[in-house]
RNA sequence: GCGGAUGUAGCUCAGUUGGUUAGAGCGCCGGGUUGUGGUUCCGGAGGCCGUGGGUUCAAUUCCCAUCAUUCGCCCCA
């Protein structure tokens, strides 16, 4: 029995083709977030289990994390997400960091789950967080960045929709209007999160189930209808429209509208899965391709996390964008072009001139051009095929004639245009 | 953790109502062509038909198990 060449379940090998795509995607991510003044950080892949127990969703920590006990009997987890890590880092230097603090990272994260479309065991995730801003300016900036990211890749408004919701608004409603306790609230939120996946009837049933049976069911039916299924908030026996949390939501939507982001809707069912979110949350959906039926990415405000480390709390808004779902989105919308090689020129050596060809290549490298020289000694046809397979944009033919005249034949593979050029002209053309 | 689908050449897939040497396209290697590919022609290599067991004179084909891949549920990027 020989060894398997397959990567471990749910992980990926990145051959040069795949790696080019990944580098291209990450470069755009970095470009956009850095244009908003965000600075890159990184943290360890391994974290103590306690970091996640109180704050991430319970299921992710208990059932969906890679974890082990180290030689000092410490419970260790391979990070399933980055938010607790960055919160820990900010708390650790709470006093000396300047606010607003804008941070981003592209960590690989690990979740032990059965893979399916858009869900692997190892994935990369762009994390963008702004610390120290209490007001909705931070929420707006966060969503604006999300929108800019999509546009940077050529996505148009008709391809995606941004849905915003408010945990705080839901809490006020559930607590004050419905009279729910903490535990019930959590259960209700989980059902709310699934709203679009189940029928209105099932939704109502499951909400009631989450609340428990002791309550007056007819009363809740009406509330569920008016809040979730067909919002008519003016009719509610409670002044939702004047709640600060509701006003925030409206202001965010209006401000985004003003700056040209008008594909934002208020969706009461947008709550997100993590427990640490405290206020406004958002999710982005692919609205053109039904196969991408989950949220592409999302985030929101989590004001309580930094304070968990025993320092003054720091209000925070952030979002995470997974590489797998995002790449699915790009593929479905034909926004994923094939990337050229990092190698600019492939030297096709004709005849017995390898040493001279090497010299030419070295001269070009010194001008900042990436040059690979064919070493196979095969006939030119084979050398060309090899270069094309690697997606190298230029071929440089070097034979005796070229060496003697110091003029080389440069061919652009995409167009088949061929020119006889000096070294100087080659570097200008390729650059 | 639960349910479905699929495992035949490097890739995408045919096929065998159970019967000698297992098929295609693409790709790969070599040649026609000792200086030009993506669009020519000729030739070639490459398969324990996922793995283990059962039924049978005979299994790649039928049955069971198992592993892998994949889709959905749960949860989430």
Image (cartoon, coloured by chain):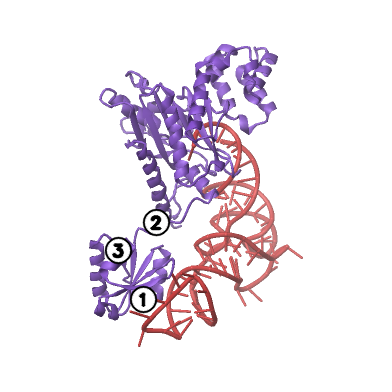
Chain colours: A purple, B red
Task: Determine the secondary structure under disc 3.
Answer: helix
Q: Which chain does tag 3 point to?
A: A
Q: Residue at x 54, y 15 (%)?
A: A242
What crowding class fits label 3: few (fewer than 14 Cα within 10 Å), some (14-19), or many (20 or more)?
few
Label 2 marks a residue whose chain is A
Quick check: A22 left or right of A212? left
Tell me if residue A127 comes above or below residue A366 in the rendering: above
Circle nearer the N terminus (1, 2): 2
Quarter of the image with the C terminus of chain A in it = bottom left
- Give the left or right position of residue A418, taking residue B63 as reference: left
Crowding at label 2, few (<14), some or many (≥20) Cα neighbours within 10 Å? few
Q: Which residue is mark 2?
A: A16
Residue A177: percent from left, percent from top: 59, 12
Q: Position of residue A16 (x, y in %)?
A: 39, 56
Q: Which residue is mark 3?
A: A428
Q: Is residue A103 left or right of residue A359?
A: right
Residue A425 is at least partly visible in this image: yes
Mark 1 residue crowding within 10 angstroms, few (<14) / some (14–19) / many (20+): few
Secondary structure beneath label 2 = helix
Residues A28 and A54: in front is A28
For marks 2 and 3, give the CA distance.
26 Å
Q: Look at the picture and state if A9 lies above or below A219.
A: below
Q: Nearer the viewer, mark 2 or mark 3?
A: 3
Question: Left or right of A247: which side holds A52?
Answer: left
Mark 1 to mark 3 CA distance (whole Å):
29 Å
Mark 1 and mark 3, same subunit?
yes
The one of A202 and A46 positioned closer to us in this rendering:
A202
Using the image as rendered, state which of residue A362 and residue A73 is in the foreground. Answer: A362
Are marks 2 and 3 in one subunit? yes
Q: Secondary structure at mark 1?
A: loop
Identify the disc placed on residue A378.
1
Q: CA distance from mark 1 to mark 2?
A: 23 Å
């Amino acid at each position: 029995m020989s060894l398997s060449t397959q990567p471990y379940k749910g992980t990926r090998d990145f051959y040069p083709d795949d790696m080019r795509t990944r580098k291209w995607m990450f470069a755009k991510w970095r470009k956009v977030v850095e244009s908003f003044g965000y600075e890159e950080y990184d943290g360890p892949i391994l974290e103590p289990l306690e970091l996640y127990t109180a704050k991430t969703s319970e299921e992710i920590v208990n059932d969906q994390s890679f974890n082990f006990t180290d030689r000092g009997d410490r419970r260790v987890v391979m990070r399933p997400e980055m938010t607790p890590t960055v919160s820990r880092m900010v708390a650790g230097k709470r006093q000396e960091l300047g606010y607003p603090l804008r941070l981003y990272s592209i960590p690989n994260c690990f979740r032990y789950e059965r893979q399916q479309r858009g869900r692997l065991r190892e994935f990369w995730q762009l994390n963008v967080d702004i610390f120290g801003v209490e007001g909705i300016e931070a929420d707006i900036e966060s969503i604006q960045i999300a929108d800019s990211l999509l546009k940077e890749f050529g996505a148009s408004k008709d391809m995606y929709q941004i849905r915003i919701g408010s945990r705080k608004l839901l809490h006020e409603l559930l607590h004050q209007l419905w009279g729910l306790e903490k535990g019930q609230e959590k259960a209700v939120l989980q059902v709310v999160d699934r709203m679009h996946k189940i029928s209105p009837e099932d939704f109502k049933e499951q909400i009631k189930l989450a609340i428990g049976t002791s309550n007056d069911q007819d009363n809740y039916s009406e509330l569920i209808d008016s809040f979730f299924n067909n919002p008519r908030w003016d009719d509610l026996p409670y002044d939702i429209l004047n709640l600060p949390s509701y006003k925030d939501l409206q202001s965010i939507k209006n401000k985004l509208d003003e700056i040209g982001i008008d594909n934002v809707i208020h969706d009461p069912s947008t709550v997100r899965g993590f427990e640490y979110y405290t206020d406004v949350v958002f999710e982005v959906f692919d609205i053109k391709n039904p196969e991408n039926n989950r949220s592409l990415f999302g985030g929101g405000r989590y004001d309580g996390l930094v304070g968990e480390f025993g320092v003054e709390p720091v209000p925070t808004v952030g979002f995470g964008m997974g590489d797998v779902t995002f790449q699915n989105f790009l593929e479905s919308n034909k926004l994923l072009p094939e990337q050229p090689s990092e190698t600019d020129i492939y030297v096709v050596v004709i005849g017995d001139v390898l040493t001279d060809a090497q010299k030419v290549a070295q001269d070009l490298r010194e001008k900042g051009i990436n040059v690979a020289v064919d070493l196979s000694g095969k006939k030119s046809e084979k050398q060309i095929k090899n270069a094309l397979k690697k997606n190298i944009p230029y071929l440089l033919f070097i034979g005796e004639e070229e060496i003697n005249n110091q003029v080389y034949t440069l061919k652009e593979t995409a167009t088949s245009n061929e020119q006889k050029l000096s070294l100087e002209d080659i570097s200008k053309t390729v650059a």
